[in-house]
Amino acid sequence: QVQLVESGGGLVQAGGSLRLSCAASGSIFSINDMGWYRQAPGKQRELVASITRGGSTNYADSVKGRFTISRDNAKNTVYLQMNSLKPDDTAVYYCNVEVKRYVVSSWNYFWGQGTQVTVSS
């Protein structure tokens, strides 16, 4: 089994910052892509940012220049530094990790439990 434990969400005023963390543990042989998604009430889940094992990154247009994704491969952890937060960033944030559990297994995606980020105006 693979567990993803997220932390770092909370309530912050507009213009403030938060740092999310997501640590993967369990039966893990290798991790490929890691990413963060978010889902606001009444909206579909959307990609916020992703990062490959080699460090290439991709961002949603709405967060470019404000959010930074990074990872620590030794710790199987992905981070999301969120600066200049806006009320529109309010959502539940989920990490998503592509994992190969064993040498002979296929790649599968796993989701974290979600962490609430609320930005007040």
Image: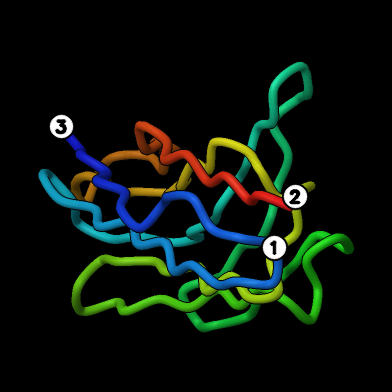
Q: Is residue 11 left or right of residue 113?
A: right
Is the residue marked by circle 1 packed among few (<14), some (14-19), or many (20+) residues within 10 Å? some
User: Vertically, is 76 above or below 95?
Assistant: below
Contact flag, marks 1 and 3 (Cβ < 8 Å):
no
Q: Which residue is mark 1?
A: 14
Mark 3 and mark 2: Cα distance apart in space: 36 Å
Mark 1 and mark 2: Cα distance apart in space: 6 Å
What amino acid is found at the position of numbered circle 3 in the picture? Gln
Label 2 secondary element: helix
Q: Please tell me which of labels 1 and 2 falls first in the chain.
A: 1
Is the residue marked by circle 2 packed among few (<14), some (14-19), or many (20+) residues within 10 Å? some
Q: Which residue is mark 2?
A: 87
- In the rendered image, residue 86, in percent from the top left (x then y), is placed at 75, 59
Mark 1 and mark 3: Cα distance apart in space: 38 Å
Q: Please tell me which of labels 3 and 2 falls first in the chain.
A: 3
What amino acid is found at the position of numbered circle 2 in the picture? Pro
Specify the quadrant of the image occupied by residue 14: bottom right
Q: Which residue is mark 3?
A: 1
User: Vertically, is 27 above or below 53?
Assistant: above
Q: Residue at x 63, y 41 (%)?
A: 38
- In the rendered image, residue 117, in percent from the top left (x then y), is placed at 53, 46
Tag on residue 47? none
Q: Is residue 119 left or right of residue 20?
A: right
Q: Residue at x 69, y 72 (%)?
A: 15
- In the rendered image, residue 23, in percent from the top left (x then y), is placed at 25, 57
Contact flag, marks 1 and 2 (Cβ < 8 Å):
yes
Specify the quadrant of the image occupied by residue 77: bottom left
Label 3 secondary element: loop
